[in-house]
Amino acid sequence: MSRHSLFSLMGPRVSDQELLTRGARYAAPTVTLALARILLVVSIFFPYWSMMLEAPQYPDGLEIVAFVNTLAGDVQEVDGLNHYIGMRPLGEAASFERASSVWMIVAMFLLIEGAASVRSRWAVLLVLPALLFPLGFIVDLQFWLHHFGQNLDPHAPLSSSVKPFTAPAIGVGEIGQFRTIARLETGWWLAAAGSLVTVVGLVLHRRAYKPLHDAAKHRGAIGVAG
């Protein structure tokens, strides 16, 4: 790899004198991005989403709780009700996402760590998956709710009483005599906070290293002119 390519990838070197003079400026993005990584990893251990199903035969309601890699709560009971209207078992939804989610979060952790190490605009691309992850979770969740609700088995016992539907990923939905209340949970908010902190880290990253880039380009221009 040429010196120019290495500079483009890693960015300018920070001199010992510069670190001594403005150490806090260069430490700020590193510390901020470290906090973002922690928030993202901790989110694994908390539920991301839940849905309460209110039904006449269940006065206390049934609740489904979704972590990034598993489902918890009244899954069997809800599957039993869904069977009568022709909906597939919940465990069949997003099976790839649940199987790979922890590894994807670990990968995002490492990418953010890499972004803290480079001193160039490549940092933005490295953290992009983490920035988009919370929104991607909601979009993927809504896709599966739509897919399952719109593809009911026409031969199910109560298929004629419930038309295809799309339950909302967030908020209240009405499905025949049932009512769903869906909300985002602690894990999702931690991941979202991690994304927000990552944005702050990028701002601090630019504040720290852009002047060094500009100075290096200026020196290069002088060298060419000379």
Image: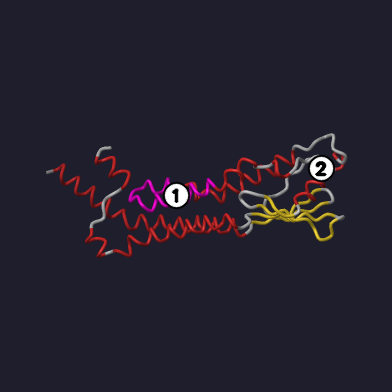
Q: Quadrant of the C terminus?
A: top left
| Mark 1 vs 2, N-terminal side | 2
Q: Indicate the amino acid at tag 1.
A: Leu
Question: Which secondary structure lies at badge 2?
Answer: helix
At which x and y percent is residue 215? Answer: 23, 52
Residue 178, relative to residue 100: is it above or below?
Answer: below
Q: Indicate the amino acid at tag 2.
A: His
Query: Of residues 72 and 146, which is closer to you in this image?
Result: 72
Residue 105 inside the magenta-drawn segment: yes
Name the main secondary structure of what is drawn in magenta: helix
At 38% from the left and 58% from the top, the residue drawn is 30
What is the basis of the colouring in this image?
secondary structure
Question: Which secondary structure lies at badge 1?
Answer: helix
Q: Which residue is mark 2?
A: 83
At which x and y percent is residue 17? Answer: 22, 61
At which x and y percent is residue 12? Answer: 27, 50
At which x and y percent is residue 75? Answer: 75, 50
Between the residue at mark 1 and the residue at mark 2, the CA separation in whole angstroms equals 42 Å
For mark 2, does the 10 Å Cα neighbourhood hold few (<14), some (14 to 19), or many (20 or more) residues? some
Q: Which residue is mark 1?
A: 110
Q: Are marks 1 and 2 in contact (CB under 8 Å)?
A: no
Quadrant assignment, res 209:
bottom left
